Every structure is written in C-alpha cells, then in structure tokens.
Image (cartoon, rainbow, N blue to C red):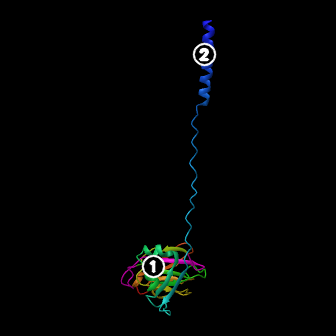
Amino acid sequence: MGMRWMLSWSLPLVALGFSAAASTPTEAPKAPPAASTQAAPSQKAQQPVALTYEPKDCDPVKELKCLCVGSVGSAEAALKEIGLDPEVIRTSGAPCIQGDFDRDGNPDYAFPGAGYRMCNGAAPVRVIFTKKGLVREVQALPREMSCFNLYRPNKKPGRDGVPPTKKDSLVDWGEGNATWLYRFDGKRWLATQCDSEDA
C-alpha cells in the first residue's frame, strides 16, 4: 500500500518536471550583423579645363611669362602641391605654357611652381594632359625649370644644341651646356642636356 502511494505521487512529479523543462525557453541564436546599406559617396563631376592666355596673343615660343587664366579642372590638388592657388589662376592667371605634348590633338598645359622667377628662380613643373576638355592625367617634369619656353617641332637642330623634335616640347634655356630639352615619349618625360657649340 505504501509503495503504491509513493508511485502515485512520483509519477505526477516526474511528468511535472518534464513539462517544466520542455516549457523553459532557450536563448535564440544571435542574428549576424546586418550589412551596411549606406550608399557610396557619389563622385563629383569633373570640372572642365578652360584656360586662355593673358595677353591673348602671347607667344610661348618667345615669351618667358605667358599667363594662363581660367579653370584647371580636377588638377587643382596637383597644382597646390607646387604652391599654386587655383583661385588665383581662375581670376588673375599664372605662368603657363600650352602645347600638345603627346600629339593627341588636345591641349596640354605646363605650370611652373610658385618659385618660378623667369630665369631667376627654378621651380618644379606640373603638366596637365587633357582629353575632351577634362584632365586625363598630371605629370611632373624630372627637373626644376627656371627659364623655359615652348619648343615647336623642328627637323633641324635649334640654338644651343637643341636636337630636332617631332612634337611640342619644353626647353629650359641656360648658358653653355646648361640648356635642357624635355620631350614626352607617351608615358613619361625625357630630359636631354644640350651641348652648345659655344660651350
């Protein structure tokens, strides 16, 4: 009798324990962090390069300080590296030589840095290559220049031993063999020291 009484109580307790365990909630697995939905910042549309000479009839083959006035497009940061202020270029202008150094039919622009003093102070030079009115790339000349002009294509050697060229180039005039010619070969600028016959 006593055993039957104990069994009658133990069965409900076991059932009760099972029911409690089954009803105990388990912690749900954490969901992985949601992927970011923030959109990438849109690229600012490139500003066109729009430069003109001041004075308008300035000849960079003969003149040492033709000024370019206007917008340098997306080349502003590159020109700031050599001390030029894009706002000053836009309003007052800065020394500059326009040519077609890669012979692709688009104008290119060579800007000497802030230290340029027309044969009295050398400065680094940045050349802006354009395509369809926009900046294609900006390159640095391998040497600083102090007294430079545009050098047109010429089948014959020029003064101070400057060799013949097939495309627009840059020349840094000096005394004796201090003259240098800079030609773009399609990838980089090549500097050639010219041996003057009078040296």
Q: Quadrant of the C terminus?
A: bottom left
Residue 155, magenta (yes or no): no
Q: Nearer the viewer, residue 150 or 93?
A: 93
- Residue 141: in sight, yes or no? no
* Image mark for residue 98: none
Between 118 and 37, the one lying in front of the other is 37
* Residue 107 falls left or right of residue 65: right
Residue furthest to the top in view is 1
Q: Nearer the viewer, mark 2 or mark 1?
A: 2
Which region shows up in magenta? 114-135
Asked whether 146 or 66 is in front, the reply is 66
Query: Residue at the location (60% across, 7% down)?
Result: 2
- Where does the N terminus fall, quadrant-wise? top right
Is residue 129 magenta-colored? yes
Q: Dot 2, how many residues are within 10 Å of its Cα: few (below 14), some (14-19), or many (20+)? A: few
Identify the mark nearer the N-term, 2 or 1: 2
For badge 2, the amino acid type reads: Ser
Dot 1 corresponds to which residue?
86
Mark 2 to mark 1: distance in Å? 92 Å
In terms of image quadrants, where is residue 172? bottom left
Q: Position of residue 71 (x, y in %)?
A: 50, 81
Residue at left offset 56%, top offset 82%:
107
103 with respect to 118 (left or right): right
Depth check, front residue: 187 or 114:
114
Residue at 63% from the left image edge and 21% from the top image edge: 15
Q: For mark 2, give the secondary structure.
A: helix
Q: Which mark is residue 10?
A: 2
